[in-house]
Image (spheres, rainbow, N blue to C red):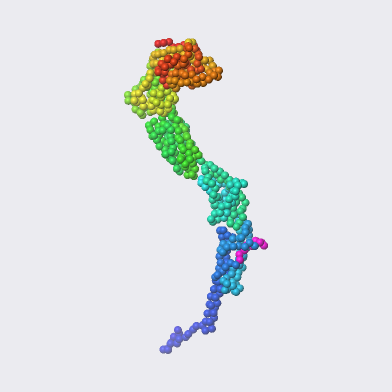
Amino acid sequence: MVIRQGSNVPLIARHGPSHRSLWWIIAGGFLAVLAGALWLIAPGARLVPSARGIARIRLRGWGTVVRKAAFFSGDHEIPLTGLGRLNPVERIASGESGLIQLTVVGPGLLQWMPWEEQVISFPVSTPGIPHLAQSTIARPLGPGLAVRFSEPVARVQYQMAPHGPVHVESPRTPSRTVVLPLPTALPSQHGTLLVSAAARDWQPFGPSSQVSWSSVPYVTVARAAHRILSPVSSLTVKFSQPVQHPHLSAWRVLPVVAGHWHEISPTEFAFTPTGPTGYGPGAAVEAIIPGGHAGPEAQTGSVMASAATLKWTTPPGSVLRLQEMLAEEGYLPVAWTATAPVSQPTLNYEDSAIYQPPQGQFTWKYSHLPSQLKALWTPGQMSVMTKGAIMQFERANGLPVDGIAGPMVWKTLIRDRLAGKTSPWPYSYISVTESFPETLELWVGNTMVLSTPANTGIPVTPTYLGTFPIYERLPFQVMRGKNPNGVPYADPVYWINYFNGGDAVHGFVRASYGFPQSLGCVEVPPSVSQTIYRQVHYGTLVTVNPVGVPPAPAS
């Protein structure tokens, strides 16, 4: 609006396009809309990668369809099928380059337009040959073997033997890792197989490569400390792999003592005795750990191939203390008196004395013992006299008779000493001389209670010389064997006391006695053998003296 000065009448001026210009604008807009619509409905296509096909089609335009699709490599044409994913109808080698040619058309009512049919070409290359990412595989336990490749694969071909059957495994979707359905792997197994792969279903398999695999090893266990073990210290075992499920309740420790297992680390476990004496002195300690799934299971799932028995020993107790206690309890021909007597000994005192014996003095209990017996006594040293005393003590207390001062012997010795219990039998001893006439003497306490002619072994089967403790006693037995001439014998004998292998003091009927007649035993008249049998015991010493040692004089 324009206003002129000095006039009361407003003047209005109109400006704008002419009618012709307006029509041109409307026509141009219509053409632009029409061109856009024609572009939108015109057929077209583009290719995107496909995990399984050679490519995937993305169509453009209303009603667009693919009339023809083909892969060209040189002069060779391979038809392609598929609505969205293009797959060749025959195999195409890995890494082959070529063209994909698509013929796309619009809807039928518009196909009269020249642009409604398009032939589009795309340069493509097929996926290369997949290669193994690793040829040596550490295989976990269980079924299957995971094989890794350099790129995703659609098919895997494998042989578990050079001339064995060929298997093909196809994952749901192409993957770099394919699990081959091999049988369940157990610990410490290994194997090889030939493997080849194809990146796509329509590609041939590449060259075969060898894969070597090994499963996790079996779990092993060993002592984590020296073989010598203190009676009250923990025993420690160490495993080759971290243990996830130890199943400690199935582990055993021998001898059976109070205590418990506990974990030090995933590879180390210890058993700690809780009793005052632990395993005891001179103990053969064993830890028995079961194998298989009843025993420890590692974090890898592995187990022990079989049960393992680990062994330790505890230091033996003092021989001097052993002799002191055997003497106090009446199993030796000597007595012992402590320098500083303890009026009321306790269990702790006795346990400490096993390795630190108190001071004292030994004296002979009997004044008329033969010199051969006295010569066997050495304080502080293990001897046949001490062994015989242990055997007699074991027999008196219902223990296995072996003459070894193990944990149960010490435990029972301490128990008897605290209870004031002593030997139920007097000390006995047998002396045999091969000087003519051969004689057997039986000593009980301070007295020689019996002296009788005896027969020892003939020269080809002599009675062994030396001192031995009686280890087996039988009232009757039919002894069987062969005479030196090879003729078998089966002789009934009575009141038998075995002291050295097959040598025994026993009764046997002979016309006379006093010279070598037996095959190694010491024979006496049957009536005399019964008296001997009633006076001696397990552990009674038998000394066979050589020719030249006369019988001891009667006291």
Relative to 8, say whether 478 is above or below: above
Relative to 453, say whether 199 is above or below: below
Judging depth in this view, the residue of 424 and 413 nearest the camera is 424
Q: Main secondary structure of the magenta part?
A: strand
- Image location (x, y in percent) of residue 192: 58, 45
In the image: residue 110, left or right of residue 266: right
Residue that appears at 59% across and 53% down: 197
Residue that appears at 57% across and 44% down: 191
- Image location (x, y in percent) of residue 41: 55, 71
Q: Which quadrant does the N terminus fall into? A: bottom left
- Image location (x, y in percent) of residue 255: 42, 32
Q: Quadrant of residue 446?
A: top left
Question: Does the magenta run of residues contain 272?
Answer: no
Residue 428 visible in rendering = no
Judging depth in this view, the residue of 297 and 127 nearest the camera is 297
Residue most extreme to the left: 343
Residue most extreme to the right: 75
- Image location (x, y in percent) of residue 329: 37, 22
Residue stretch rendered in magenta on the structure: 68-76
In the image: residue 92, left or right of residue 139: right
Residue 111 visible in rendering = yes
Q: Quadrant of residue 214?
A: top right
In the image: residue 445, left or right of residue 153: left
Q: Which quadrant does the C terminus fall into? A: top left
Judging depth in this view, the residue of 170 and 525 nearest the camera is 525
Relative to 97, say whether 528 is above or below: above
Question: Does the magenta run of residues contain 70?
Answer: yes
